[in-house]
Image (cartoon, helix red, strand yellow):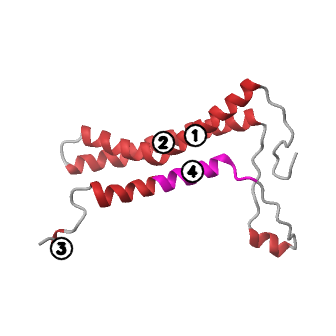
Amino acid sequence: MDSRGNIASRTLMGGTRLLEYTLAVGVFLGSFALWVVAPFGSLWIAAQLAKDAVTMMIYVLFITPVTMTACAFALGALYRAYLRVSGSQVTRDRTAWLGSLSGDRRLTRGRRPILDVSLTFSALTAIVLLVVWFLLLAENHVPAGFLP
């Protein structure tokens, strides 16, 4: 076992390796669903249900946290299943300033956990999609005072 709790020399059978990769893809899709599908899907559902803007915002304020919480719980279950199948353990890294204050100057940084990578990638994707929608697809993204 290495310093992060990962099993260095593990022999996995073909089916177990396939299950591990499938769960990794599921974690990435779950992260994407958390940051992109749940918010935009909530907006779409609220727009279909509401008759006016005030009602739509009330629906959005209720539907979005519920769907994002459900996605977060599902993502947590997928990640726990991935950790169980892959045989790795979650360990917390100490921040650099804690290491330097304690006199422990070793750099023992291992691979980033798949959940960190997938959440970062999906959050950046959501930001890019929001900017693209705002700049290119939104109907009224310029304030009315600046129009000729």
Does residue 102 sit above or below 83 in this rendering? Answer: below
Q: Quadrant of the N terminus?
A: top right
N-terminal of the two: label 3 or label 1? 1
Q: Which amino acid type is marked by label 3?
A: Phe
Disc 3 to disc 4, how far (Cα)?
A: 37 Å
Q: Which label sits on residue 14?
A: none
* Residue in the image at 54% along x and 44% along y: 31
Query: Residue 66: horizontal and vertical position, in percent?
Result: 44, 42
N-terminal of the two: label 4 or label 1? 1
Name the front one of labels 2 and 3. Answer: 3
N-terminal of the two: label 4 or label 2? 2
Q: Which amino acid type is marked by label 4?
A: Leu
**Which picture quadrant has residue 131?**
bottom left
Does residue 40 sit above or below 132 in this rendering? Answer: above
Q: Which residue is mark 3?
A: 146
Instruction: Look at the magenta stretch and give its main secondary structure.
Output: helix
Query: Mark 1: which secondary structure?
Result: helix
Disc 3 to disc 1, how far (Cα)?
A: 44 Å
Q: Look at the image and tell me whether residue 81 can be seen.
A: no
Q: Which residue is mark 2?
A: 33
Along the horizontal axis of the image, is 3 left or right of 35? right
* Residue in the image at 51% along x and 40% along y: 71
Q: Which label sits on residue 75?
A: 1
Q: Which amino acid type is marked by label 2?
A: Ala
**Would residue 118 be counted in the magenta stretch?**
yes
Along the horizontal axis of the image, is 29 left or right of 39? right
Q: Which residues are magenta?
A: 111-125
| Local crowd size for mark 3, using a 10 Å CA cut-off: few (<14), some (14–19), many (≥20) | few
Query: Residue 16: horizontal and vertical position, in percent?
Result: 73, 27
